[in-house]
Amino acid sequence: MKTNCITLLSALLLAPLAALLAELPTPQENSIARQWAQSRVFTEDAKLPFSFTLGGKLSDELLRDWKRTDATSELDTRRREHTRTWMDAATGLQVRLVATEYAGFPIVEWTLWLKNTGKVNTPVIENIQGLDARFERSAEGEFVLHGLRGDSCVAESFRPYALKLGPDAVKICSPPVGGENVSGKSSDGPDGWPYWNLEKPGGGVILAVGWPGQWAASFARDHERGLRIKAGQQLTHLVLKPGEEVRTPSTTLLFWQGDDVVRAQNLWRSWYLAHVLPRIDGQPQPPVLTIHGDGSLERWLKVQAFLDAGIKPDVFWRDAGGDNTWWPITDGLPRRPGKAWHNTGTWEIDKVKYPEGFRPFSDKVRANGMQFMLWFEPERVGNPNSWLGKNHPEWLMPLPSKDIGSVLNLGDPAALKWLIAHIDGMVKSQGLDWYREDMNGANYGTAWRNHDAPDRQGFTENLYVQGHLAMWDELRRRNPHLRIDSCASGGRRNDLETMRRAVPLLRSDWTVPSNNDKPLHREGIQAQTYGLSSWLPWNGAGVAFRHDSSSVLSVYLPCFGMNQVEGWSKSEERRTAVQRGYREARRVASLLLGDYNPLTPYSLDTTSWIAWQFHTAESGGGVIQAFRRSEAANETLTVKLRGLDANATYEVDNFDGGKETRTGAELMRGLDITLREKPAAAVLVLKVVK
């Protein structure tokens, strides 16, 4: 294949992109990615970046003798797709590598598909690795693996780590597995974060595994200068029947040069915003302000209170509701107080509570300039007496915890067809602008594996993942203006394939009211922003349930909201505080999508400060967020800003009052932030003075 895998942006494309993206790659970085792709994918004797075994034989040995074809197509003006297909005449197995190149970014990305085109079952296919590649470092220095802790509803969720990988070191990552308990949630648990930055002397490579299921990745150092990375669905040992097809997780690599890991992460953020963040009518999802409620016209006064206060929310959010569900549960199982919502499986409007459904309410929401979002949890059937439980038990797979219910098998074509049609019908009939999907309960991976025969291990999960992604794609195809909010007991399914289709309005359940009184609650919210911002530019913490200023400022994020009880607007003090929160969150929202620069070390310590900076190329300005913890002795923190124009003059506007003018050079040498009280927070907006 003659076409380069990575090309530079044309001058026509580069100009508008540069206005949006703060960090752009160098020509050398694009060249490195192009060379790697050529040597691993597109040349005659390429050392292929994946592996599997078929009938006990390694793919490297097999594919060299199979018939091969190549094809290239233009996806759009900035993406080109390359497909290389191998065919085995003996077994009918077709192996298809689909790779995407991105104009102007040093990205190598691919997915592997395996299909039985024959008339009999294939031999056993096992250990399918979407990524299997060796990387080398120079003689000086060592590999360092940067990543995060996954989410498990704790203060430590998204805690960053940097692990030195010396000779013979091995690091294995996956969502939690313990005995027969298999999570199945793609960003769950201590080792479940499916994004890494592998630093080596002179540069590195960022890796993302896109698989909303049970993946595994290993980083194994040899005794010399090499490191082998393998990543794929954790368990595959299966035969394919005629016509069946499985796929690997998507693999995304971003190559970078230098010794600045923060710059590398901002290069990732730039690519993410340009090519991953979902778009409506070609426009990326903007930040949103939200309010919550039950979605009934009888309770419209709660909405009107915000409007009368001059607050203009973007999204009205109707969530599960605890015991006040929007679907009927009169025949549900007995539940603890606040847990009636566990009785899922009948996805119909409760006509007693909502005689006309949500449509009159959602129409009024839109008439007032907002969008309407409704919570669903279609994968879990928590009530055996629900519509799904009674009418289609053959579609259900038991979860290990019977209290939480069963799993709707999205790999079953009939179940998937029904679910798509049903949710699509509700989107249209109820006037939904946002589809919020949750995934509660534990050990979906166990349910998938228990459904497999010994020679079909991993098959149920693979079809389930394909079905889930196909459902979202089809809902978006049928409803081009539908937005999707990804939730899985908080932030436990936020892999790259999921993030291409959805945004996380609630990145972790750590922010919900049941955790308000736990140690390090406020500090955990701040620390989660610190860690997650390197990877997912667009995220939210739901709404602020605590009303002190430091807690509210801690959730100034691309998704922001404040939970209020009835009558809040009658208190002048509360009304002023809420107005300020929404006003300030709106002001900084777009700035939060710029480059992200940590200004302090990560910490949950109550004796510390924590701070960061967002910088935008478009305006030349940005925002600083700094937090003095409850036991921090020093009332002043000095931070050195990044990315500014040394010769430019900046206005620094402190939301607590006061403005000063400083040069970029002065701000990069050091800016003092003083907070007399503790705990306390400071938000400072920078803009270039013309």
Image (cartoon, rainbow, N blue to C red):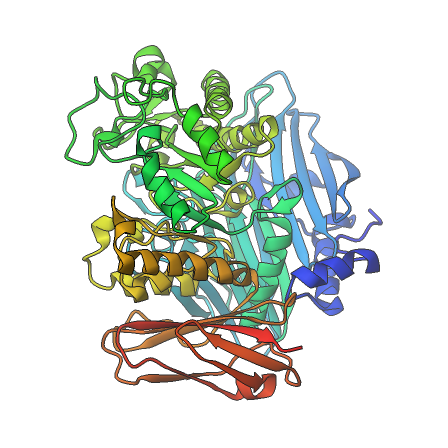
| Whole-percent x, y for residue 272 in the image | 59, 54
Residue 238 image offset from top left, x and y in percent: 49, 30
How many badges with numbers are in the image? 0
Check the image and report above or below for 552 versus 657.
above
Coordinates of residue 283 in the picture (x, y in percent) = 64, 46
Does residue 583 appear to the left or right of 258 in the view shown?
left
Q: Quadrant of the C terminus?
A: bottom right
Q: Nearer the viewer, residue 44 or 459?
A: 459
> Is 467 left or right of 274, judged from the image as shown?
left
Taking depth in this image into account, of 68 and 161 the one nearest to the observer is: 161
The residue most toward the top is: 391
Residue at horizontal 69%, vertical 46%? 100
Going 45% across and 32% down the picture, which residue do you hit? 364
Most extreme residue toward the right is 2
Whether residue 491 is visible: no
Q: Position of residue 567 (x, y in %)?
A: 25, 46
In the depicted structure, whether residue 82 falls above or below residue 323:
below
Where residue 335 sits, quadrant-wise, is top left
**Quick check: can you spot residue 172?**
yes
